[in-house]
C-alpha cells in the first residue's frame, strides 16, 4: 500500500486535530468536579470510568494523520501512568496546551528548535518550583483528598488513605471483587505468600484449620525432603537445645519424612510444620532469600555446596510468630538483621527501576511490600458489574 505524505501546515493541522480529539474526551474527567466517561467496548456491559489513561486507550479515529496525533498524546498518558500511576488527565491537558501553542508559534514563523528549547527551560523551572513546594511530608488528610478526587467519593477516599497509612509507602494495595455489597479492607502485616502446610495433621487449631507457632525456628531450603535421615541430625540438635518444634519451608515434604513428622506430631514428641516454598524457578530462589534475610536464616541449597544433613542451628531463622493455613503462610516480625533487610530492600528497589517488564515490576513490588511494608486488599462489591 502506498504511503500518503503531508507537509508543513497541512501536517500540523491534522496532527493537532488528533491531539484535540483525544484531549477533549479525556479532560472532562479532570479534577474533583470531573465527569465520568462511558466506554462501549463492543462486548459485555459498558465501562464507566474517570481514569484519563483508560479513556485515552479507547480512542481511535479513521483519518490516519489525525490518528497519529491521537497516538502521540496517548503515549503521554500511558507513560505518565507507567511512571507514577496517576496524573494522566493532567499530563494530557498539558500536552494539548503545549501542542496548540507550539503550532501557533511555528505557524507565526518561530523556529521549532527554539520553541522546543524554550519549553525545556520552562519545564526545568516549573519542576524546580514544584519540588520546593512538595518537600514537606504528605499528611493522611491530603492522601484522602487525592483518593476522594480520583474516586469521586469521600468514603472511598478515606478507606484508601487508611490502607496506605497501614502498609506504608513501600506497601502494596490490591483491589479484588467482593461477593458482598460495600467495601472492606484486609491488611496483612509481615510477609505472606500463597503456599500453605503440606498436611492438615500439622494444624494447631483444628477449629480454624491453621497452625500457629510463637518464636519458631525456621529451616529454609529449596530441596524436596523425602528421607528422614536428611533432616535427622538437625532435629536432634534442636531437641538437645530443649525445643520440640521447627518450621520447614521446602520445595516439598513427602514419603518417609512426611509420615515421620505426622506421627511425631500426633504423639506429641516433636512438632514439625512443613510449608511448601513459594514461587517457581529463579523467582523462588529470590523469594527464599528474602525469607532468609527477613528471619535471619540461611537458605540451604546445593548451589551453595550445602546439603540438608549439614544444616546447623545457626542456619535457622526466627520470627515473632508464624501462621499457616491450607493456602497461605504469614511470617510476622522476622528477627533478621535490620541492616541486611534495608540492603535487600534497596536492591529490590534498584531492580524495579531497571526492569522494563510490567510483570517483573509487579512481582518485585510485591516482594518489596512483604519485606518493607505490608499488603492491603480492598474488596469491593455492588449490585451490578458496571456499578
Image (spheres, rainbow, N blue to C red):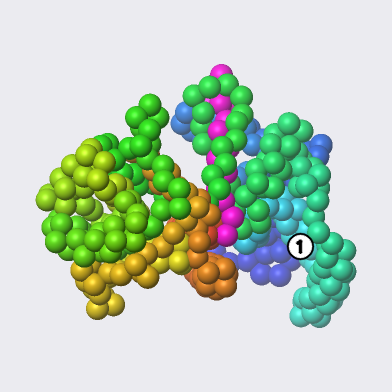
Q: Is residue 216 magenta?
A: no
One can see residue 298 in this view: no
Residue at 37% over, 64% down: 316
Compared with residue 257, is residue 343 higher up or lower down, i.e. above or below?
Answer: below
Q: Position of residue 67 (x, y in %)?
A: 60, 54
Image: 52 above or below 364: above
Q: Position of residue 288 (x, y in %)?
A: 37, 62
Q: Which residue is the site of mark 1?
A: 99
Residue situated in front as seen by the camera: 382 or 53: 382
Residue 313 lies, with reference to residue 330, above or below; the image says below
The quadrant holding residue 387 is top right
Task: Tell me where residue 132 appears, x and y as whole percent.
Answer: 87, 68
**Whether residue 225 can be seen here:** yes
Task: Report the front residue among 16 and 367.
Answer: 367
Picture residue at 51% right of the left edge, 32% below the top: 177
Quarter of the image holding residue 208? Answer: top left
Could you tell me which residue is drawn at 45 percent across and 66 percent down?
296
Q: Secondary structure at mark 1?
A: helix
Q: Residue 101 appears in which quarter of the rendering? A: bottom right
Q: Nearer the viewer, residue 84 or 286?
A: 286
* Residue 380 is inside the magenta segment: yes
Residue stretch in magenta: 372-387
Amino acid at each position: 500500500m502506498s504511503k500518503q505524505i503531508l507537509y508543513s501546515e497541512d501536517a500540523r493541522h491534522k496532527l493537532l486535530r488528533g491531539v484535540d480529539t483525544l484531549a477533549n474526551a479525556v479532560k472532562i474527567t479532570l479534577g474533583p468536579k470531573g465527569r465520568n466517561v462511558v466506554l462501549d467496548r463492543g462486548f459485555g456491559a459498558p465501562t464507566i470510568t474517570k481514569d484519563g489513561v483508560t479513556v485515552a486507550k479507547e480512542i481511535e479515529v479513521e483519518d490516519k494523520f489525525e490518528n497519529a496525533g491521537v497516538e502521540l498524546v496517548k503515549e503521554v498518558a500511558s507513560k505518565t501512568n507507567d511512571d507514577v500511576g496517576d496524573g494522566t488527565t493532567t499530563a494530557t491537558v498539558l500536552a494539548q496546551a503545549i501542542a496548540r501553542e507550539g503550532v501557533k508559534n511555528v505557524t507565526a514563523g518561530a523556529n521549532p528548535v527554539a520553541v522546543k528549547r524554550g519549553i525545556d527551560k520552562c519545564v526545568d523551572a516549573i519542576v524546580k518550583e514544584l519540588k520546593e513546594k512538595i518537600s514537606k511530608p504528605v499528611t493522611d488528610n491530603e492522601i484522602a483528598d487525592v483518593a476522594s478526587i480520583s474516586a469521586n467519593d469521600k468514603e472511598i477516599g478515606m478507606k484508601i488513605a487508611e490502607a496506605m497509612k497501614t502498609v506504608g509507602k513501600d506497601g502494596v494495595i490490591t483491589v479484588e471483587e467482593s461477593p458482598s455489597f460495600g467495601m472492606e479492607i484486609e491488611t496483612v502485616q509481615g510477609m505472606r505468600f500463597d503456599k500453605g502446610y503440606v498436611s492438615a495433621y500439622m494444624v494447631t487449631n483444628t477449629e480454624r484449620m491453621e497452625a500457629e507457632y510463637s518464636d519458631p525456628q525456621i529451616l529454609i531450603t529449596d530441596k524436596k525432603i523425602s528421607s528422614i535421615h536428611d533432616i535427622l541430625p538437625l532435629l536432634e540438635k534442636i531437641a538437645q537445645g530443649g525445643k520440640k518444634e521447627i518450621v520447614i519451608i521446602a520445595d516439598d515434604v513427602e514419603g518417609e519424612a512426611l509420615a515421620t513428622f505426622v506421627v511425631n506430631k500426633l504423639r506429641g514428641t516433636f512438632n514439625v510444620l512443613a510449608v511448601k516454598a513459594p514461587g517457581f524457578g529463579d523467582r523462588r530462589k529470590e523469594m527464599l532469600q528474602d525469607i532468609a534475610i527477613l528471619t535471619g536464616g540461611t537458605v540451604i541449597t546445593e548451589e551453595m555446596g550445602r546439603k540438608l544433613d549439614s544444616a546447623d542451628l545457626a542456619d535457622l531463622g526466627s520470627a515473632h510468630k508464624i501462621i499457616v493455613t491450607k493456602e497461605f503462610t504469614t511470617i510476622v516480625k522476622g528477627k533478621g538483621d535490620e541492616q541486611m533487610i534495608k540492603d535487600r530492600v534497596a536492591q529490590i528497589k534498584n531492580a524495579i527501576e531497571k526492569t522494563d517488564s510490567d510483570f517483573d515490576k509487579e512481582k518485585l513490588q510485591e516482594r518489596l511490600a512483604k519485606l518493607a511494608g505490608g499488603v492491603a486488599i480492598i474488596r469491593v462489591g455492588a449490585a451490578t458489574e458496571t456499578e
